[in-house]
Every structure is written in C-alpha cells, then in structure tokens.
Image (tube, rainbow, N blue to C red):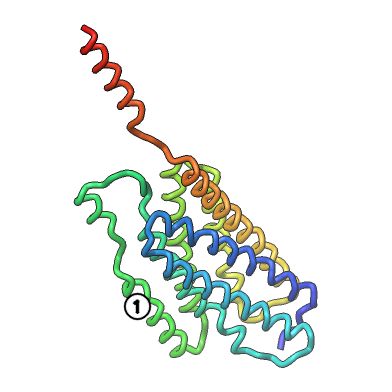
Amino acid sequence: MTDYPLSLAVEDFVPVLLTAGGAALLVPYLAHRAPRAAQRAATGTCLIFAGGLAKAGWKLTVALDGPDLRWLEKALFPCLGVGFALLAHAALTARANPGTPSTRTEEVASRPPPLWAFLAPAAVAGAAAAAVRGTWPLLLLTVAMSALTAVRLIILARADDDIPSAALLGTWLLGMFALGPLASRPDQSVTLQWIEQSCNTLTQAAFAWACARLARRHRRTDAHPKAPFAGSSRRTGTRTERKSTT
C-alpha cells in the first residue's frame, strides 16, 4: 500500500471540486440549448463527482492509516468514463445557436448520435477492463469522452465568439491528455503524485473557469435577449412612412 502525506490527500479534493463545479455550471447552459440534454448532463456530472470523490476519499483514508479500500480507488475511471460519455452526448445535443431558427435539413444534420452509441463503448471498456484486470480500457474511454466533450464545448464557445473560453477549454483538453499517462502508472512516488495533482488542479481550474464564463454569458443572454430583426423593422417602417408621405 502506497503511503500518502495528509497534505497530498487533502489537496486531491481540490480538482474534484473544480471539475464537479464546472460540470454543474454546464447543466443549465446545455439545458438552455437543448432541454432534453439537462438530465443526461446532470447524471454525468454526478458520476464525475462520485468517481473523483471516491478516489480522493480512498487516498485520504490511506493517509490517515485507515484500511486500504481499493474499491474506492477503482471506482474512479468507471464513473469518469460513463460520466463524460453522458456529458459528451449532452454537449452534442446542444445547438450552437439556440435562438436562431433552423431549416429541416439543418435540424436533421445537427442531430447527435443515439445515446446507445456512447454507452456501448463504456460497456465494452468495462468488459475489457474486467478481462485484462486493469484500468487502462476505462482510462482510454475517459480520455476519449472528455476530449469529445472539450471539442464540442470549444465549438459552442466559438459560435458565441467567446475565444477566451475556447482557449481555456483547449488548455483543459491538453491537460487531460497529459494526465492520462501520469495517472495510469501503477507505482507512483509521492513526488510524481504531487506533479500529477498540481497539473490536475491547474487543468480542472481551466475547465471550471471556462464553464463559469459560458454560464455567465448564458445568463447575460437570457437577461438581455437580442432583437435581431428590430433594425430591419425600423428601416421598413421608415420606408413605409416615406412612401405614404409622398
């Protein structure tokens, strides 16, 4: 059993809270763009939080010389994989411009893949992990689904001309790719753990910041809705008045 300093174990809760907080902010943001995505986004957020909390709780238990509850540690990637699969599907369901009317062709083209197309890989990864008695299939699932979530959120942010949020999400994406190899190493020293957790904290802080920006922009849009045809109406009215005058 690996020994963890108490400070290391406590710090492990920070990225968990950042990730869960950011994902929670995405729920109303995605629900505004696709109401049917709200439940999947909320469920995915709960699973992501549960997985991170389980791993952090296991590490804290070990640091306090408690029992080695390996099932808590092993719950990380199953929860993250399925959680990000649901969040990715919710993000793909969301429309880039919810206030803009779309044609029938655009609606068909923008339809997301069915939910089973996201849950089936999760089931396959779980079966593969059980077969090889390792977590790497679930790790690959987590990286793939979080990358898909990041790319879709970047597209949504760019559609709103929110370049800073897109950049933050890009940072989160790069950080997730960097964290994968670090987290998958079986024997980790305390120094490597500190490096991994520091990178993880910065990565999840970028994610939480981006989600906060997206949510804040969404609230401002709701508070001050645009009137895209107001200008054209005024111009039309002016032309009508001129015609009636002449």
Q: Residue at x 36, y 45 (%)?
A: 99
Q: Position of residue 198 (x, y in %)?
A: 70, 63
Residue occupying the far bottom of the picture: 67
Quadrant holding the N terminus? bottom right
> Which residue is at 46% across, 85% downward?
129
Image vertical order of residue 44 relative to residue 61, above or below: above
Image-quadrant location for residue 234: top left
Q: Is residue 108 above or below residue 61?
A: above
**Residue 148, x across and y down, in percent:** 42, 61
Asked if residue 160 lies left or right of residue 54, the reply is: left
Q: Which residue is mark 1?
A: 120
Q: Depth check: 79 or 95 in front?
A: 95
The residue nearer to you, when weighing 68 against 214, is 214
- Residue 112 vertical placement versus 142 (above, below): above
Name the amino acid type tagged 1.
Ala
Would residue 238 be found to the left or right of residue 53 on screen? left
Mark 1 burial class by Cα count in 10 Å: few <14, some 14-19, many 20+? few
> Outermost residue toward the front?
245
Quarter of the image with the C terminus in it: top left
Quadrant in the picture for residue 34: bottom left
Q: Residue at x 66, y 62 (%)?
A: 201
Could you tell me residue 203's position as x and y percent?
61, 59
